[in-house]
Amino acid sequence: MKKIILAFAGTLVLIAAAVIYVVSSRPDTAAALPPAQLTLAPGQLLYRDVSTGRIASVPLDNPGAKPKVSGLRCDRFAVAKQTAVCLAVEPGTLPAVTDVIVLDDHLNVRHTESLGGTPSRARVSPDGKLVHWTLFVTGDSYAATGFSTRAGIYEVETGTLVKTIEELAVYKDGSRYTAADVNFWGITFAADGNRFYTTLGTGGKTYLVEGDYSHYRGKVVRENVECPSLSPDGTRVAFKKKVGDGVWRLSVLDLATMKETALAETRSVDDQALWQDDHTVLYGLDNAVWSVPADGSGTPRRLAADAASPAVTG
Amino acid sequence: MYIAASRTSDLAAGTERKPALRRVAANVVALGVVSLVTDVSSEMVTAVLPLYLVLGLGLNPLQFGLLDGLYAGATAVVRVLGGHLADRWRRLKAVAGLGYGLSAVCKLGLIAAGSSVAAIGVVLAADRTGKGIRTAPRDALISLSSEPGTLGRSFGVHRALDTVGAFLGPLVAMAVLALSLGSYTSVFFTSFCVAAIAVLLLALFVRDRPGSVDRAAVSLRAALGLLRSKDFRRVTVWAALLGLVTVGDSFIYLLLQRRWDVAATYFPLLPLGTAGVYLLLAVPLGKVADRVGRWPVFLGGHAALCLALVLICGPQAGFWLGVVALGLHGVFYAATDGVLMAAAGPLVPKALRATGLAVVQTGQAGARMFSSVLFGLAWTLWDLRPAVLVAAGCLAAVALAAALVRPVRP
């Protein structure tokens, strides 16, 4: 009997502790500002406000200004032309289901796709016609660490959805490459809306694949290139180069000469870089958005604190 | 009056069928409840970990996958060590408690680790170490608390309770996320509290190994001497051989997904299908094993897996075939996991029970790990269907050989 009382008392205390912790860690919603109405007007730096998860905006030429914070919650965010994309985990889904939300230039919802997985990368093609993303997918609950990636594309005008580009016909050294373990992540499109680059992960290695969207094929052009991001002029790719386990160096590859330049950011960057213009790349690191020259010169500059997933309108 | 009274008692003794829970030792039920509560705790974390790593911390989960194999290897060593120390100190409950306690503290460790990849890696490794430490002493306690003739049922009850916890964990995690408005640390803290409740229940209600044991028996040499016992060696070797030709869970689910084009949203539900069948059949198959022999049921489980593989690769692809294949996968678990422990238990002297069970488990787990690598290789080299058919063929051959050799008398 004594044991039962002890068990009950102990269980109650522990449950009470859990409830108190849960309730006290609820974010304070009363302090939040009323949401601002944002548009995709040129000259803004948009980003994810990390502490609230909402999309915020500052002028690109004065990033220190007080941000306007919208009511839109996203885990990843990207824009191009009149199109924006927001990846948001549906609350209360385990394993996670991600909403891929396509938005217009007033951040009104145009289309939503619900896909299984956790948001990793999101981009819009320079012409604003293709929205593409990468999700992390877990296999099963018994092997918690068995991850794979799924990269997909949505055509804004036709409504065509490619859930995963796994079926892309990839050629390596002239012959068709097929393996069970192929993973794609980090897509970037050229201004023509057809040429694209992505990372192919297979056999413990990563490759840069140059793709042709209309023919739906691609070829391996280089090894050890992850999360490519094509420059606005289409000549260079900013990417993360693996230099150790879990350590990546932000670099730029010249596609004509295949010459690599390590950028001035020496800390490990695990993000798909974003070209602000042909000379500067932006990236998220340690809950802040940074900028660094694309030619290896200069030093990193912090543009916004408490920020992630930068996007630039232009 | 007199006659009527005696008749009622006869009826009670003869025909009343008590539920399985009451017909197993209280200690086994207590251990089952501890496992249930612990599984709620650990599955809570498992369910939110991907979200936490990617969205909460902005880490790349692919870098954790690489360490997975390393952890699994370390767990194997720890398991034998935990089993042996439990026997040596004659403190099965204490060593199991240490394992449960370590895993509980690791939940707080996840909060303390913050966003450091190295620290998270250490915490996850420690969590698995805790699991490795506790498994063999716990299974030894189950087998020592039961009558030899009803071991199958005892393990069935324990595994069924354990699986209930695995079902509840994600639900609790979802509730916590909803209540805390998406706070991952709340999930970890709640998970810690739940794990602490399990440790409390273990401390209060689980009794250590009953009866006195020959004190001289437990040395490292005696432990190594286990493998000189013919019956025990045979079970260990055959279980490992079968493990070597067993296709891993994640492959089964991938196969099902590819063949039936399961949407990624539903993909994570596949393991729940296996677990559901496992939950329903663990006790009945344990009882069958007690009646007809544990080894035949153990081999029958492998036959079910073999059939599942053939179905997955067969010429027909229908929704129901997929359901049947998933069900057979659940049968495989229900007929092998606890049943192997029930088969191996009586072959090991009481004083060495934890060590012995740890050796069998480690042999099987190691072989399965190796088989995953082999199967992955075969998949890459030959493509899906040939790889599965070869695997099913190997499985059938080894199971048939094991049936002919009959390493354990039923």
Image: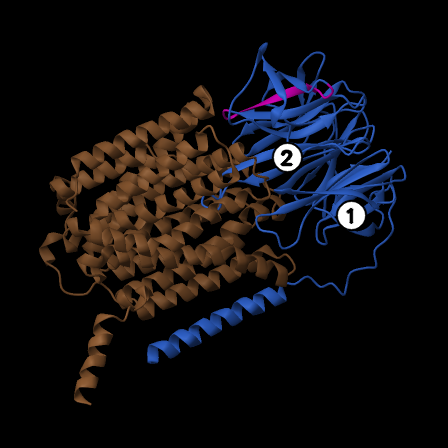
The residue most toward the top is A174
Disc on res. A180: none
Occupied quadrant, residue B215: bottom left
Rendered location of residue B311, percent (x, y): 42, 34
Q: According to the rendering, which colour does chain B have?
A: brown
- Given the image, what chain letter belongs to the residue carrying mark 1? A
Disc on res. A269: 2
- Given the image, what chain letter belongs to the residue carrying mark 2? A
The answer to whether B389 is drawn above or below residue B160 in the figure is above
Residue A207 covered by magenta stretch? yes
Mark 2: few, some, or many residues within 10 Å (few <14, many ≥20)?
many
Of the pair A84 and B331, the residue shown nearer to us: B331
Magenta residues, dominant SS class: strand
Secondary structure state at the residue bearing disc 1: strand
Of the pair B393 and A277, the residue shown nearer to us: B393
Of the pair B56 and B15, the residue shown nearer to us: B15
Rendered location of residue A142, percent (x, y): 45, 45
Q: According to the rendering, which colour does chain A have?
A: blue
Stretch in magenta: A203-214
Same chain, labels 2 and 1: yes
Comes first in the chain, label 2 or label 1: 1
Asked if residue B355 shows in the view, the reply is no
Secondary structure state at the residue bearing disc 2: loop
Q: Is residue B179 left or right of residue B25?
A: right
Q: Is residue A231 left or right of residue A205?
A: right
Disc on res. A55: 1
The residue most toward the bottom is B1
Give the amino acid at mark 1. Ile
Q: Are marks 2 and 1 in contact (CB under 8 Å)?
A: no
The answer to whether A299 is drawn above or below residue A88 in the figure is above
